[in-house]
């Protein structure tokens, strides 16, 4: 009896410790934002900041702009992702494995790198723009504003839809197709009546993910938007700008963003819940060889889309070897850029990125495994609260998290701002919901009877967890950790707010160099980031033993 | 060295629902005891209470007279075989089996020796260093069994261990389990919903329904002398007729189904004129009568020839469908549509009270 009580206490103590961590690093900063948003400078409570936002067109139009670009990009991504996924699953395309990897790579780089690469290609002084101007003797202004933002976001986001829908198609048994065919359905009818409805939940879920990502991204509109100001840009400039910064107003803006993402989150949950089918394919769809014109068109389309999607990456890599004097290209190949960024005084950017990433991953994995174990196997009110709290960061845009951290941790005894710790914790918290979700799924697949077997053989509960549960989870957790790692090293939105010159990471460096028009250095940094991502991706394929990615 | 288990008025509730309602059982040392019942009857819950995965909300469970209610599972020294085997997928066969011994901190040499010994007993010594993914279902089953008995548990518990195997392997493994259990002489509690399996392996069976024990008896008695209609229909097939116990004088009872009257000499209740009863007749307890008008009049709907026996599916005048099994003989099958009469083997059939809750058969009377 004593033994049983002691074991219970270990897990309970752990649950309380985790709860305390989340109260400190999630609830307290968010609470502070809420508080600040309704407290005036003289200490009275008022909604004046919200009134200010919604009464001036200069402010509220950013929200309209955000919705416009987000809806447009989401629609384009969804359609493009669906078509490419179905194409690659139904028609045999040569080199489809390579295409698959390229699509994933184009997704893994931060969107703002795409923005800056497209400026190099289609901007006022862009490579393609110049060719077109010379060819047709015109003066094109380059792609900025609404169309530029939508272009970048669509190309950057359709891979997400592609990955999800492709996964759903893989789980669809071909016998469904065959059954429909035997019941007299034509090919077109089959796609429309069987395949589209079955992948609809997945399509909607991924589209909403795209929506949330695009809506809260600030790097892209900042770079390519020019006069077209979106909400995250407003938020950033209210908080970080050189003039007219207003902490409390920024807090109110944060509250508005959280409100919107919260609504989106519930819509996604509702739809996902209403329309999910469980499918598992005994005999998945096999890509068929197409003939003649259809085959050629399919190949051209697939390769064209993928080429356009990875074009920014190619541009960046090529640029990184070009001799650049500021923004103008001299057209000579050189390693000068790499020499610059690898100088001893700059090398910390690289080491910071890897160290912060690794530290955050370690934290995320250990906490994620513990939390998912607690919420699945040790159900109680306490763990239910933890479960809900850990989902909070899912709906909080990175910039909001960054801002809330600066509010919360810039005074003693909680003086973390400017340190590496605050960046690591921010990264950790941003990734936590994903890790917990995947770990929860992994634990769900482990039959409790395996743990019971260990206990019946005389093992204590703690020992069972360490010797049986953890090793069984390892493979899945490891591949999840690699994906998290790739996501973390390309994180910008919270790091850009939390960094100091000592804690600068790759993405921040890229952003800063782009703003300073040091395109050569930016490209070299980006190339290192891309190469790291590709290597990590290859490692992921090796560890997980599959070509399927879930983010 | 074998232990007795006594379960006294045990209660289990999940929320407001009472799953086990005051169950009492006595399991003898070395006995192969089976809990049999439809899914959801509480048999697995009771098993998990014995090993300690489920808490006990009322009553006691005792091992050799000692209450174990509050002893944690890992200190109870019971071996368990799970429905899905629960083999540790990241450990070799040897490490799986040695797991419990290592927890008991036995010296290395002894662990090695005991693992080798048990591998021989369950006949998988050639698989010692394999990983579980490379094992068939039957082999995994043997590993699970070896892992549970190598720790020399006081009690061996098995939760539907054969339900994931195919039919042929199931028969093979149940014989193996029975034989190994005899060899090690360990008190065993076995849970299954498969009545044939229960009849094949058990020394005694407890039939459960809705959290209540219906009958505890040997396989033979459970089948031949079920104590109520539930047991009679759950174990094997029984055709149930509404009948009348017309009289019972001097040990000779007259029972009537429709217009068919027959005598029985093993009815418990004394003279009780025209008492409505339920008569349970197993398919093989009918005698087909094609010559006279004696018996229950039925029409043959169709027949199935199965080699050893022939099954006739017939219908009474009231529209009740009845299954009749006869040993196959050389004569032609009875053609569909023929009217025949069914007599019963009165010494074999069972008679229950009209509500089906109690048997009226005096088991002391033989033939």
Image (cartoon, coloured by chain):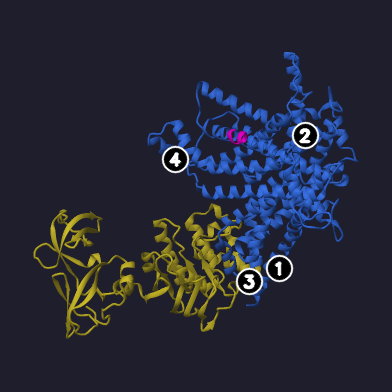
Chain colours: A blue, B yellow
Q: Nearer the viewer, mark 2 or mark 3?
A: 2
| Residue picked out by circle 4 | A176
- The reply to whether residue A74 is visible in this rendering is yes
Q: CA distance from mark 3 to mark 1?
A: 27 Å
Q: Residue at x 15, y 74 (%)?
A: B262
Report the side of A69 relative to B287 (left or right).
right
- Are marks 4 and 1 in one subunit? yes
Magenta span: helix, strand or loop, mainly? helix
| Residue picked out by circle 3 | B104
Depth check, front residue: A220 or A386: A220
Q: Is residue A338 above or below residue B362?
A: above
Which numbered marker is on residue A13? 1
Q: Nearer the viewer, mark 4 or mark 2?
A: 2
Q: Residues within 10 Å of mark 4 (few under 14, many from 20)?
A: some
Q: Nearer the viewer, mark 2 or mark 1?
A: 2
Q: CA distance from mark 2 to mark 1?
A: 47 Å
Q: In which chain is the residue bearing label 3? A: B
Q: CA distance from mark 4 to mark 2?
A: 47 Å
Range drawn in magenta: A75-79
- The part of the image, by quadrant, that contains residue A349 is top right
What is the residue that sits farthest to the right in this orientation? A345
How far from the left and from the top, in percent, is residue A23? 73, 61
Q: Nearer the viewer, mark 4 or mark 3?
A: 4
């Amino acid at each position: 009896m004593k033994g049983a009580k002691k074991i219970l206490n270990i897990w309970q103590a752990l649950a309380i410790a985790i709860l305390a961590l989340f109260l400190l690093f999630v609830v307290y900063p968010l609470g502070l934002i809420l508080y600040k948003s309704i407290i005036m400078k003289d200490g009275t409570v008022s909604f004046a900041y919200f009134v200010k936002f919604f009464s001036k067109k200069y402010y509220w139009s950013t929200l309209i702009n955000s919705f416009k670009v987000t809806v447009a990009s989401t629609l384009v991504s969804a359609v493009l992702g669906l078509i490419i996924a179905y194409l690659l699953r139904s028609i045999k395309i040569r080199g489809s494995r390579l295409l698959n990897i390229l699509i994933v790579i184009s997704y893994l780089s931060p969107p703002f790198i795409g923005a800056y690469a497209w400026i190099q290609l289609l901007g006022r002084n862009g490579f393609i723009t110049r060719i077109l101007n010379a060819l047709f003797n015109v003066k094109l202004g380059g792609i900025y504003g609404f169309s530029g933002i939508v272009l970048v976001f669509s190309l950057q986001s359709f891979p997400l839809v592609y990955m999800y829908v492709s996964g759903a198609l893989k789980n669809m048994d071909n016998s469904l197709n065959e059954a429909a065919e035997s019941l007299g359905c034509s090919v077109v009818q089959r796609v429309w009546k069987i395949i589209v409805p079955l992948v609809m939940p997945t399509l909607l879920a991924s589209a909403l993910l795209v929506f949330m990502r695009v809506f809260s991204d600030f790097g892209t509109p900042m770079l390519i938007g020019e006069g077209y100001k979106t909400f995250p840009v407003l938020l950033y400039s209210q908080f970080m700008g050189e003039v007219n910064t207003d902490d409390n107003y920024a807090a109110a803006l944060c509250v508005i963003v959280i409100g919107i993402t919260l609504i989106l989150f519930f819509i996604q949950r509702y739809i996902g819940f209403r329309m999910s089918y469980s499918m598992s394919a005994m005999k998945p769809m096999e890509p068929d060889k197409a003939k003649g014109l259809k085959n050629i068109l399919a190949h051209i389309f697939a390769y064209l889309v993928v080429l356009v999607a990875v074009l920014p990456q190619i541009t960046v890599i090529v640029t990184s070897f070009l001799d650049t004097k500021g923004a103008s290209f001299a057209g000579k190949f050189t390693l000068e850029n790499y020499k610059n960024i690898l100088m001893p005084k700059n090398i910390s950017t690289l080491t910071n990125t890897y160290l912060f990433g690794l530290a955050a991953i370690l934290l995320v994995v250990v906490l994620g495994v513990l939390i998912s174990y607690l919420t699945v196997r040790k159900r109680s009110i306490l763990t239910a609260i933890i479960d809900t709290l850990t989902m909070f960061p899912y709906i909080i845009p990175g910039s909001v998290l960054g801002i809330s951290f600066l509010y919360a941790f810039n005074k003693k005894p909680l003086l973390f701002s400017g340190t590496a710790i605050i960046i690591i914790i921010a990264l950790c918290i941003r990734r936590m919901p994903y890790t917990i979700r995947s770990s929860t799924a992994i634990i769900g697949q482990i039959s409790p009877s395996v743990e019971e077997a260990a206990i019946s053989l005389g093992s204590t509960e703690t020992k069972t967890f360490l010797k049986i549960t953890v090793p069984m989870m390892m493979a899945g957790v490891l591949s999840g950790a690699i994906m998290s790692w790739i996501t973390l090293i390309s994180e910008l939105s919270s790091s850009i707010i939390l960094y100091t010159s000592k804690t600068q990471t790759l993405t921040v460096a890229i952003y800063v160099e782009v703003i300073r028009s040091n395109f050569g250095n930016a490209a070299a940094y980006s190339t290192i980031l891309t190469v790291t991502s590709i290597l990590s991706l290859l490692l992921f394929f090796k560890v997980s033993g599959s070509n399927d990615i879930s983010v | 060295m074998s232990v007795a288990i006594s379960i006294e008025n045990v209660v289990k509730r999940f929320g407001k629902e009472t799953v086990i309602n005051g169950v009492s059982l006595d399991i003898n040392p070395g006995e192969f005891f089976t809990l049999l019942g439809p899914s959801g009857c509480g048999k697995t819950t009771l098993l998990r209470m014995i090993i300690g995965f489920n808490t006990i909300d009322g009553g006691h469970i005792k091992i050799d007279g000692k209450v174990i209610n509050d002893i944690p599972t890992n200190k109870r020294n019971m071996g368990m075989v799970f429905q899905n085997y629960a083999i540790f997928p990241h450990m070799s066969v040897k490490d799986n089996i040695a797991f419990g011994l290592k927890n008991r901190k036995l010296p290395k040499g002894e662990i090695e020796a005991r693992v080798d010994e048990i591998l021989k007993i369950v006949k998988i010594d050639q698989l010692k260093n394999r990983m579980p993914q490379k094992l068939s279902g039957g082999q995994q089953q043997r590993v699970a069994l070896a892992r549970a008995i190598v720790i020399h548990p006081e009690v061996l518990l098995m939760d539907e261990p054969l339900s994931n195997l195919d039919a042929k392997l199931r028969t093979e493994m149940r014989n193996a389990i029975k034989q190994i259990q005899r060899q090690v002489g360990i008190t065993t509690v076995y849970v299954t919903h498969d009545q044939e399996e229960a009849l094949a392996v058990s020394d005694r069976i407890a039939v459960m329904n809705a959290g209540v024990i219906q009958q505890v008896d040997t396989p033979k008695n459970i089948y031949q002398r079920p104590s109520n209609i539930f047991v009679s229909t759950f174990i094997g097939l029984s055709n149930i007729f509404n009948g009348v116990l017309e009289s019972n004088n001097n040990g000779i009872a007259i029972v009537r189904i429709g217009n068919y009257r027959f005598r029985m000499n093993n009815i418990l209740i004394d003279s009780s004129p025209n008492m409505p009863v339920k008569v349970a007749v197993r398919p093989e307890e009918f005698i087909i009568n094609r010559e006279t008008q004696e018996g229950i009049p039925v029409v043959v709907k169709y027949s199935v020839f199965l080699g050893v026996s022939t099954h006739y599916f017939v219908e009474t005048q009231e529209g009740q469908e009845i299954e009749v099994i006869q040993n196959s003989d050389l004569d032609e099958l009875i053609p569909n549509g023929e009217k025949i009469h069914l007599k019963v083997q009165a010494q074999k059939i069972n008679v229950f009270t009209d509500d089906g809750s109690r048997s009226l058969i005096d088991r002391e009377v033989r033939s």
